[in-house]
Image: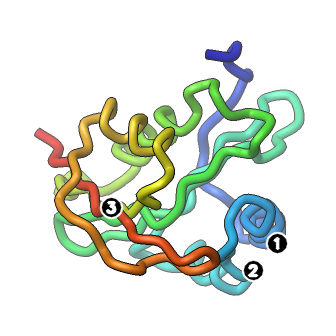
């Protein structure tokens, strides 16, 4: 594992929607628009936590999570390539659990079947595979594994 960057976790600001879109389009084939990030940032049932460098406040990792009643769905989790391997994905997952309402006890997510690194991280964090969603992803087309975790 690389040496951890000196980061702070916080919720993204609406003024950061364009930056989030920029990073998202560099990381994902099916990137979210700036408008999608802004919509999530303004929603009462969604949060976008970010990891920022302490010295510069530059976003180096982010997630998007929504919830209804006791179930949260992690819609996005991303670490900029130059900061991968530092445990930031796992740290974001921990942070998410801490900022959601206490009655949220189930966490669901989809992950590309070929993304072995992410699957391994989720399993280490207590997620298990529930099933598969056929052709869930586009560009390239691929199945998704549906993973879940119950908070005890």
User: Where residue 131 sits: x, y (%)?
Assistant: 20, 64
Name the side, left or right, on which 74 lies relative to 133. right
Q: Quadrant of residue 54?
A: top right
- Measured in 3D between alpha carbons, the distance from the residue under mark 3 to the one under mark 1, in whole angstroms, is 29 Å
Q: Is residue 42 above or below residue 74?
A: below
Q: How crowded is mark 1: few (under 14 residues within 10 Å), some or many (20 or more)?
A: some
Disc 1 and disc 2 in contact, CB within 8 angstroms? yes
Q: Name the residue under label 2.
A: 34
Describe the element under mark 1 as helix, strand or loop.
helix
CA distance separating discs 1 and 2:
5 Å
Frontmost residue, 116 versus 48: 116
Please name which of the two marks, 3 or 1, marks the residue nearer to the observer: 3
Check disc 3: other Cα within 10 Å, few if <14, some if 14-19, many if 20+: many
Picture coordinates of residue 94, whole percent (x, y): 40, 37
Image location (x, y in percent) of residue 99 = 40, 49
Q: Residue at x 66, y 58 (%)?
A: 12
Q: Quick one: label 2 or label 3, which is nearer the N terminus?
A: 2
**Which residue bears the numbered disc 3?**
145
Residue at 63%, 83% (x, y): give it: 36
**Camera-nearest residue between 148 and 29:** 29
Along the line of sight, the residue nearer the viewer: 101 or 94: 94
Residue 57 located left or right of residue 33: right
Residue of label 1: 18
Disc on the earlier residue, 1 or 2: 1
């Amino acid at each position: 594992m690389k040496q951890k960057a000196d980061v702070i976790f916080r919720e993204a600001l609406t003024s950061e929607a364009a930056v989030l879109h920029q990073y998202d389009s560099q990381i994902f084939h099916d990137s979210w628009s700036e408008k999608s990030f802004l919509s999530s940032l303004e929603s009462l049932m969604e949060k976008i936590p970010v990891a920022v460098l302490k010295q510069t406040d530059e976003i180096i990792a982010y997630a998007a999570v929504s919830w209804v009643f006791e179930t949260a769905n992690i819609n996005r989790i991303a670490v900029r390539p130059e900061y991968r391997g530092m445990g930031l994905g796992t740290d974001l997952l921990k942070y998410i659990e801490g900022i959601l309402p206490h009655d949220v006890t189930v966490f669901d997510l989809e992950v590309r079947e070929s993304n072995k690194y992410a699957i391994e991280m989720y399993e280490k964090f207590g997620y298990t595979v529930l099933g598969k969603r056929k052709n869930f992803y586009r560009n390239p087309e691929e199945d998704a594994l549906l993973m879940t975790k119950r908070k005890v």
